Amino acid sequence: MFSLVVHVLDTTSCCVMCCSDIYKKWNVGSRKNSSKSCKGPIECLPELVAACEWRENIFHSIVSDELQAPQISQAWNFLSHLPVIEVNLRIKGWWENVPNGENEKALPNIGPGIRDEKNWTQVHADQEYVFQINLRRIGLVCSKGKYDSKAITPRFPKAKDEGWFVILGEIDKKELMALKRVGYIRNHSTVSLAFYTPETTGRYIYTLYLMNDSYLGMDQQYDVYLDVIPASIAAQTNTEVSDAMSDLTVA
């Protein structure tokens, strides 16, 4: 919703329109992409980025029939500044009977609705864990030797820094579990979200959202499949000891 306000759009607007008025002259739904990496009509910014492969000549070939040269230059300036973010997920905590005291596991990046038995990760009930979200910016543009944190928002009344929200929730229960504001991602950034697993064993699907506050269509969504097994006294004890040691270190 904040992105809609920034670009003065309504909820029915196509996200490609948020770059500038020139896209209103481009028939987004019917224009066929000439890039081999993306087939069919281009309907959102990530598809446009994938189609161009960060190459201006490919972008030119896609829009040259609809836009004039100055408009293409303006559009490419916007597209090349888009915050394309690569996401890697890990979960940290304690597990019983894990060799070598392992306390961290990688999580697969799974889009919504894709279920596979191998994607379930076991966690103990009623135990604190931490999602570690590693964010890496792709296609970074450096302007005059400096990193430009300002979003391209021609209709917004003042300069605005690009930012993100990382949100963890459980859709089935309509429950918000964690939320964190993240500033401009220059290169790499790591976000940690702590949460407690349910007291009842069973399988739960949490959803992680990475939402941009400046551009429509750049949000990402991942499902996290947790297989909650019985609580572990050893795991809880290790967590309490670790927290106590951390408190002593801070003191």
Image (spheres, rainbow, N blue to C red):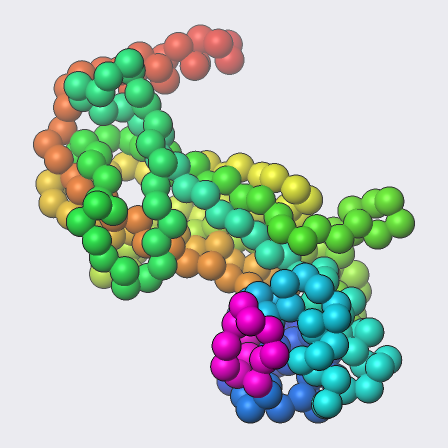
Q: Hey, which quadrant is residue 53 in on the image?
A: bottom right
Q: Can residue 147 be seen in this view?
A: yes
- Whether the magenta-drawn stretch holds residue 4 is answered as no
Q: Which residue is drawn at 18% across and 32% down?
A: 124
Q: Is residue 82 left or right of residue 91?
A: right
Q: Nearer the viewer, residue 26 or 21?
A: 26
Residue 38 colored in magenta in the image: yes
* Quarter of image, res 132: top left
Residue at screen point 41% across, 42% down: 89
- Please state the horizontal and vertical placement of residue 200, each as a whole percent of the image: 11, 41
Residue at image position (79%, 61%) is 159
Whether 58 is drawn above or below 64: the answer is: above
Q: Is residue 224 left or right of residue 140?
A: left
The x and y percentages for residue 229 are 13, 35
Task: Report whether 170 appears left or right of 83.
Answer: left
Q: In which quarter of the image is residue 45?
A: bottom right
> The magenta stretch spans which residues?
32-45
| Residue 166 in the image, given as x and y percentages of width and height | 48, 50
Judge by depth and name the residue closer to the eye, 154 or 75: 75
Vertical placement of residue 78 versus 238, above or below: below
**Residue 250 drawn at (x, y percent):** 51, 13
98 relative to 7, above or below = above
